[in-house]
């Protein structure tokens, strides 16, 4: 029987894989995961779901309204953001409460691809997501 991982263990593994492959997944990205929030949140949601955790991907404005088109995961009334490091001194796995005033959701996303206005290299397209899902051994 497969051992159930905690959400933090999953988030750490997803983050490490994305850091290692950031440049090929999103042109211009780096180990801080710049411009990868939609890809990272989609991957994190996939693996949370795989291990039986309920999760949604949300988008909105975060950190004093200075971020636009930012994505994060929400699970059990907690925000899980594995790309907050691109904006400053945040932990690689940033977990905060849903009432955190630094995160202002503007849309709950059932299908992340609806973010059609985002640059193509930042979208969680099928080929990128397949590479991630097959590459992360969880």
Image (cartoon, rainbow, N blue to C red):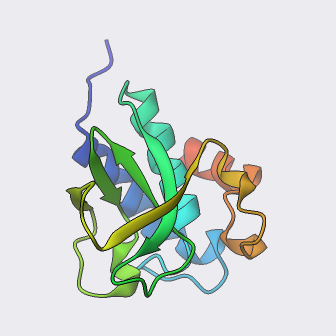
How many numbered marks appear?
Answer: 0
Compared with 108, 16 (above or below) is: below
Could you say where residue 80 lies in the image, as x and y percent from the top left?
Answer: 32, 55
Which residue: 27% across, 38% down?
A: 76
Q: Is residue 67 left or right of residue 101?
A: right
Residue 7 visible in this rendered orientation of the protein: yes
Compared with 30, 132 (above or below) is: above
Q: Is residue 58 left or right of residue 96?
A: right
Q: Is residue 13 left or right of residue 89?
A: right
Say which quarter of the image contains residue 36.
bottom right
Could you say where residue 137 lies in the image, as x and y percent from the top left?
Answer: 44, 40
Which residue: 71% across, 72% down?
A: 118
Compared with 121, 6 (above or below) is: above
Q: Is residue 15 left or right of residue 120?
A: left
Viewer-proximal residue among 96 and 42: 96
Compared with 17, 4 (above or below) is: above
Viewer-proximal residue among 137 and 115: 115
Could you say where residue 27 lies in the image, as x and y percent from the top left?
Answer: 67, 81
Residue 138 visible in this rendered orientation of the protein: no
In the rendered image, the quadrant that contains the C terminus is top left
Which residue: 56% across, 78% down?
A: 35
Could you say where residue 56 lies in the image, as x and y percent from the top left?
Answer: 47, 42
In the rendered image, the quadrant that contains the N terminus is top left
């Amino acid at each position: 029987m497969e051992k159930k991982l905690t959400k933090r263990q999953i988030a750490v593994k997803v983050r490490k894989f994305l850091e290692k492959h950031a440049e090929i997944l999103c042109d211009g990205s780096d180990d801080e995961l710049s411009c990868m929030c939609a890809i990272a949140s989609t991957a994190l949601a996939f693996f949370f779901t795989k291990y039986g955790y309920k999760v949604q991907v949300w988008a909105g404005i975060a950190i004093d309204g200075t971020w636009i088109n930012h994505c994060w995961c929400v699970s059990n009334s907690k925000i899980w953001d594995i790309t907050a490091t691109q904006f400053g001194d945040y932990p690689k796995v940033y977990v905060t409460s849903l009432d955190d005033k630094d995160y202002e959701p503007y849309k709950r996303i059932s299908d992340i691809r609806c973010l059609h206005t985002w640059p193509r290299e930042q979208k969680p397209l099928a080929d990128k997501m397949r590479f991630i899902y097959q590459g992360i051994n969880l």
